[in-house]
Amino acid sequence: MIKIRKRLADTGFGVLALVVFAVAAFPVYWMVSTSFLPNNRIRGENLAFFPTPDVFTLDNYRTAMFNARAPFPPAVLNSISVTFLTLVIALVVGFVAALALTRFQFKGRRTFIVLILVVQMIPGEAMIISMYRIIDGWQLLNTIIGLTLVYAAGVLPFTIWTLRGFVNGVPKELEEAAMIDGCSPAGAFWRVTFPLLAPGLVATGVFAFIQAWNEFVTALVIMQRPDAMTLTLWLRTFLQATQATNWGAVMAGSVLIAIPAVVFFLIVQGRMTGGLVSGAVKG
């Protein structure tokens, strides 16, 4: 009887998991499927749930990639540049700050930790005007550096706080044991401690990547020229007030934007899972 109940429970949880997966995956499937359909099959009575050979088309991708209002290649280059620089700055600065907060005792340490939490609680939209005036004063509007500085400042509080938990989870005695065996302090850190922190760096790097790749509001304020647009702003150019929305091109553009993110997650997903679990143990 107990085995039957356990089997029924496992079956029920399996069915529930499939339902949740279907609900989460259907919008992605609909986006990809719609990107291969002509506009007359996207809206109306003759909807198609998958592109059959008689309606399959690549015109939406041609329209998206050769958009006259905002070219696609500069938008890709801008997004990749901003995301990469934000990722590097967030990880390097956040890692060094997390080490300082964890391994060293100094005056104002607790105050700094509290300030990190306070800054994290402030909505980014509340600081848009201040950020705009600062970036404008530095003459960095419509530049990769200006947008990168804003993004890095936004993700650093979370990065520092999260990495602090990972560093806290690695006993300092490991480094001391390595130094007893003949390693220098720097060698003990890079050979013993740093490999254990790599999953944490990946987990926090994923957060920085998502923030920089998907952000829209700040980029809309700072990057105003067509040649300075990121991909999220580029996708907005298909929505026009005086014309009908080209939903096929919008879906094709969304697929193009999602591809780099999917590739990034496939590369880091193994270490990301370990990092998330490790960070939940001690911090």
Image (cartoon, grey):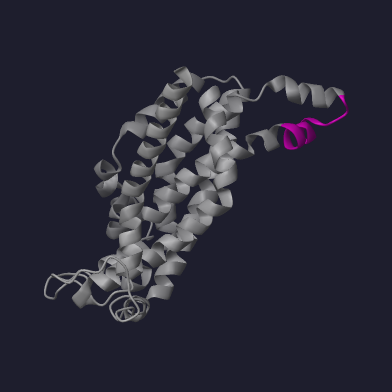
The residue located at (51%, 26%) in the rendering is 280
The residue stretch that appears in magenta: 181-192
Residue at the left extreme of this rendering: 242
**Is residue 191 inside the magenta stretch?**
yes
**Taking 105 as reference, is 29 left or right?**
left
Q: Position of residue 164 (x, y in %)?
A: 54, 29
Q: 133 or 223, which is in the foreground?
A: 223
**Where in the figure is residue 119, as x and y percent of width and height?**
36, 33
Residue at 37% over, 33% down: 120
Front one among 119 and 61: 61
* Left or right relative to 181: residue 135: left
Query: Quick check: 249 above or below 30?
Result: below
239 versus 271 height, above or below: below
Observer-nearest residue: 47 or 82? 47
Q: Residue at x 35, y 54 (%)?
A: 135
Q: Position of residue 156 (x, y in %)?
A: 46, 40
Q: Residue furthest right?
A: 182
Q: Answer yes or no: is residue 230 visible.
A: no
The answer to whether residue 77 is seen in the rendering is yes
| Above or below 282: residue 237 | below
Looking at the rendered image, the quarter that the N terminus falls into is top left
Q: How many marks?
A: 0
